[in-house]
Image (cartoon, grey):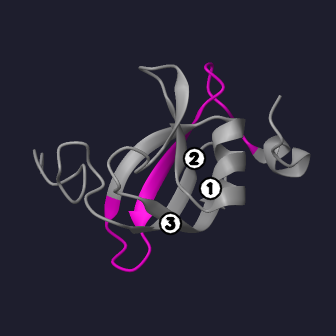
Amino acid sequence: MSALDPAVAARLTRGQDDLVPAVVQDASSRAVLMVAWMNDEALHRTLTTGRGTYWSRSRGELWVKGETSGHVQHVREVRLDCDGDTLLVLVDQTGPACHTGATTCFDRDRLL
């Protein structure tokens, strides 16, 4: 059971997998760095520790951004969209945000 504040939990609209997408944005430049997933526990830990914490769908476990790479996200703000089904996480990013070593996960394959 998560320790997420019940008032916050009640505002979330989760998908079938009990996850909410989190759009991670640089707090200064406003560049979109990455998209990740959060469950209630990941959101609780993000809010209480100030470190970007997410749910890995491939590994089936929580992970803290930068825990192994050193590319830490210091969370400045977390916002919930009007439908409660997406989070916006504003961060100060240390090092690249993408696992490829790129600053952002959105620097390739422009479609339009």
Mark 2 surroundings within 10 Å by alpha-carbon count, few (fewer than 14), some (14 through 19), many (20 or more): many
Label of residue 74 in the image: 3
| Residue 27 picture quarter | bottom left
Q: Earlier in the sequence, mark 3 or mark 2?
A: 3
Residue 74 in the image, given as x and y percentages of width and height: 50, 66
Q: Is residue 52 above or below residue 16?
A: below
Discs 2, 1 touching: Cβ within 8 Å = yes
* Residue that mark 2 sits on: 86
Q: CA distance from mark 3 to mark 1?
A: 21 Å
The residue segment tinted magenta is: 12-32
Kind of residue at disc 1: Asp
Give the dominant element type of the magenta stretch: helix, strand or loop.
loop
Q: Amino acid at mark 2?
A: Thr
Nearer the observer, disc 3 or disc 1?
3
Callout 3: SS = strand
Q: Amino acid at mark 3?
A: His
State yes or no: residue 27 in magenta: yes
Q: Going 15% across and 54% down the picture, which residue do you hit?
A: 107
Q: Residue at x 47, y 23 (%)?
A: 57
One can see residue 83 in this view: no
Q: How many angstroms separate mark 2 from mark 1 (CA)?
A: 6 Å
Element type where label 1 sits in the image:
loop
For marks 3 and 1, the one nearer the N-term is: 3
- Give the residue number, with chain letter if any, for mark 1: 81
Closest to the observer, 112 or 101: 101
